[in-house]
Amino acid sequence: MKARPLIRGKGREGRVGHGRARMGGGSEGCVMAGTSVVFDIETQNLINDMPGIDRESKIKMLEVSCLSYLVLPSRELLAGGARAAQAVEDAAMHTLWRDEDPDNVGPFEPMLKAFDEAEVIATYNGCGFDHLAMIKYYQGDNRRYQRHMAKAHDCFSRLRDATEMWYKLDALLKENDIPTKTANGLVAIQWWAEGKRELLQEYCEGDVRALARLLALPQLKLPRTAFRAPNAMFGLASAIAASRTSAALLPPVVDIETEPEPNAAPGVV
């Protein structure tokens, strides 16, 4: 018995609604839905306090104390201007703690599910820190981690690679008239040790909202230069557009199901 391919629809489709936009072919056009996630983590210790042979291995040993994230509508980010800015302000903030896991699925599973559905996952130095520290919470599911990393948009690394400058987030916020950070990572570690969770939560959430405001800008002022970074160098709108273009290049979705051949003998598969 041959497996007969069943093709669903004429276009290319991913997950629609909260998840990926569907890229339709021909006259169907495309459904401009989808979400993008901006997140930040705080840790219990300093990198140099951890065992390991190099910086990356030490970061992977760090325990996350808490994290915060926003789920933003990609449609509003693509609209730019006031609509993108308002979407950042309207989005509900989510904060998770490493010692709170009421459903016994892992304390950070809600954010990982948001990653599953997102078109873009945005951070500041996430590829060099946040994602590395989070890898242990995937519980060995390397394929899921790779899928998430394929969506990663690291504003820090993109600016660094393009300008050869290591910009601190606070410097970019100040240059672009966005309220700056309320503390730093060292203070956040101290707050966790002292049980000052309200202060820690306020700090982490503030960082996420500030980064989202930055990523929603049409262009970015950079310190000590007249150059303005275009959205393609740092912004969410360009990252979403790139993700959708990439998805549109994929072949149509095909479901392989086994069906009996016409006139096949009963019981023959």
Image (cartoon, rainbow, N blue to C red):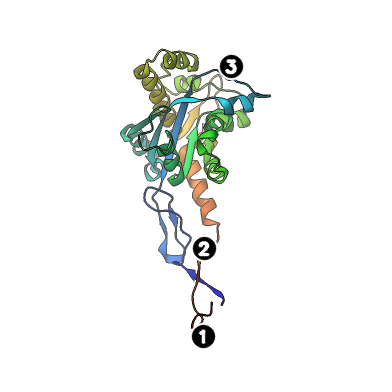
Inspect the image, locate mark 1, and give the three-letter code of the amino acid beneath it.
Answer: Ala
254 or 21: nearer the viewer: 254
Count every numbered label the image shows and give the total: 3
**Residue named by callout 3:** 49
Kind of element beneath mark 1 = loop
Whole-Å distance between the Cαs marked 3 and 1? 69 Å
Q: Residue at x 37, y 47 (%)?
A: 18
Inspect the image, locate mark 3, and give the three-letter code of the amino acid beneath it.
Answer: Asp
Q: Residue at x 49, y 14 (%)?
A: 186
Residue 29 on image: x %, y % = 42, 60
Specify the quadrant that holds the C terminus: bottom right
| CB under 8 Å between discs 3 and 2 | no
- Other-residue count near label 3 (Cα within 10 Å), few / some / many at <14 / 14–19 / ≥20: few
Residue 181 on image: x %, y % = 43, 18
**Residue named by callout 1:** 265
Q: Pick whichever of labels 3 and 1 is earlier in the sequence.
A: 3
**Residue named by callout 2:** 252
Inspect the image, locate mark 2, and give the three-letter code of the amino acid beneath it.
Answer: Pro
Specify the quadrant that holds the N terminus: bottom right
Q: Foreground mark, 2 or 1?
A: 1
| CB under 8 Å between discs 2 and 1 | no
Q: Quadrant of residue 30?
A: bottom left
